[in-house]
């Protein structure tokens, strides 16, 4: 699949050992924030939060963004995102693929289970004597269920549901 690997060195493990720094990473995974936002949100002094931010910047888990305003924002780096959400891209790809297969299988299944309009027109044209034999044939063809495709629809429905559940859980 994907070969995006993150090398976690000793310094990164030390940085991640503090609960406050992990909380900061989680908050920054939602959107960028300023020192004041983080301080108020975590209920800690700005100087304490600044120390934690400096450690996270040195470990290259977050970066400071200086914009046109006087405010300095912090956001996750690619390394920080991969630590918090290592398999999210794979889940989205699997969800899209299973959704496409599910839609295709469902369409194919409906085409095989739904009675053919040609058979209905032909049944009207058949004289009374042969109507019973022809209607038996039409019912047999209309009610044959393709079990393999039905199993595929059920499997991919379950897979899609599990993937949606995983995404919503996060």
Image: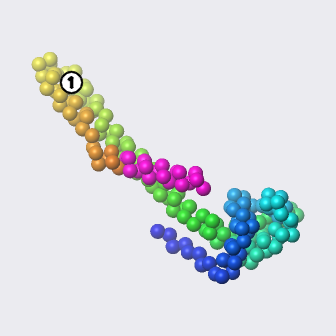
Camera-nearest residue between 2 and 155: 155
Q: Which element carries disc 1, helix, strand or loop? A: helix
Q: Position of residue 117 (x, y in %)?
A: 28, 30
Q: Position of residue 78 (x, y in %)?
A: 65, 69
Q: What residue is pinned by disc 1? A: 123
Q: Residue at x 78, y 71 (%)?
A: 53
Q: Residue at x 75, y 67 (%)?
A: 20
Magenta stretch: residue 1 in it? no
Q: Quadrant of the C terminus?
A: bottom right
Q: Position of residue 143 (x, y in %)?
A: 25, 34
Q: Which residues are magenta?
A: 153-170
Magenta stretch: residue 160 in it? yes
* Residue 78 visible to an observer of this rendering: no
Q: Residue at x 58, y 53 (%)?
A: 169
Tell me if 136 is positioned left or right of 51 in this view: left
Main secondary structure type of the part rendered in magenta: helix
The image quarter in which residue 83 lies: bottom right
Up-down: is 52 above or below 11?
A: above
The image quarter in which residue 141 lies: top left
């Amino acid at each position: 699949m994907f070969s995006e690997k993150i090398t976690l060195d000793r310094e990164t493990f030390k940085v991640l050992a503090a609960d406050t720094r992990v909380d900061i990473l989680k908050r920054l995974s939602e959107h960028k924030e300023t020192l004041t936002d983080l301080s108020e949100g975590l209920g800690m002094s700005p100087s304490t939060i600044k120390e934690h931010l400096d450690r996270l910047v040195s470990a290259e888990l977050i970066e400071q963004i200086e914009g046109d305003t006087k405010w300095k924002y912090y956001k996750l780096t690619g390394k920080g995102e991969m630590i918090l959400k290592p398999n999210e891209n794979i889940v989205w790809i699997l969800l899209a693929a299973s959704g496409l297969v599910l839609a295709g299988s469902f369409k194919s299944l409906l085409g095989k289970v739904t009675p053919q309009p040609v058979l209905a027109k032909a049944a009207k044209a058949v004289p009374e004597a042969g109507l019973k034999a022809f209607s038996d044939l039409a019912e047999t063809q209309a009610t044959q269920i393709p079990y393999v495709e039905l199993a595929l629809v059920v499997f991919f429905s379950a897979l899609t549901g599990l993937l949606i559940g995983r995404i919503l859980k996060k």
